[in-house]
């Protein structure tokens, strides 16, 4: 089997607010159905679904790798639709900050070090 892509289905508590949140942080959207919107930025895509379950949303996490962590932080800081935002931290593999979306989903916004980027691409 050759995998050509993977897209997560992100839950939303308030579908319209979640759509605004992902647009605010830099994703473009495409209508799929009344219950599903495709979001993308560069080659990366996710589906936002009009579905909410507390346990799922509170345990849902995505790592979003970015080229410029400071620019990503500034963008996330400006959106009124986030639940919580933590400062940028240095970690062994690069830099990361955490932002919680409107449904409680946790986004690990990450800028990887060069060596880690190379290792992940070759894996």
Image: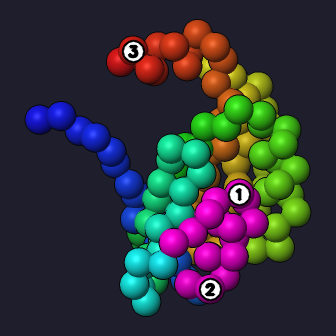
Rate crowding at label 1 as few (under 14), some (14 to 19) or many (20 or more) other CA atoms within 10 Å: some
Kindly identify which numbered label has been placed on residue 116. none
Q: Residue furthest top?
A: 115
> Which residues lie in the magenta part?
15-30
Residue depicted at x 56% and y 16%:
116
Residue depicted at x 71% and y 32%:
67
- In reply to whether residue 24 is colored magenta, the answer given is yes
Q: Is residue 98 above or below residue 105?
A: above
SS state under label 2 = helix
- 2 relative position to 35: left or right: left
Using the image as rendered, state which of residue 55 and residue 36 is in the foreground.
36
> Which residue is denoted by mark 3 in the rendering?
122
Q: Pinpoint residue 110: horizontal percent, then vertical percent.
A: 66, 36
Q: Quadrant of the N terminus?
A: top left
SS state under label 1 = loop
> Which residue is denoted by mark 2 in the rendering?
16
Q: Earlier in the sequence, mark 1 or mark 3?
A: 1
């Amino acid at each position: 089997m050759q995998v050509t892509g993977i897209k997560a289905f992100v839950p939303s508590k308030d579908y319209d607010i979640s759509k605004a949140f992902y647009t605010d942080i830099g994703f473009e959207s495409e209508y799929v159905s009344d219950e599903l919107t495709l979001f993308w930025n560069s080659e990366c895509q996710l589906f936002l679904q009009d579905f909410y379950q507390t346990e799922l949303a509170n345990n849902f996490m995505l790592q979003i790798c970015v080229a410029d962590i400071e620019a990503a932080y500034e963008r996330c800081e400006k959106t009124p639709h986030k639940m919580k935002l933590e400062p940028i931290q240095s970690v062994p593999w690069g830099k990361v900050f955490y932002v919680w979306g409107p449904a409680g989903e946790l986004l690990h916004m990450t800028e990887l070090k060069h060596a880690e980027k190379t290792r992940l691409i070759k894996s």
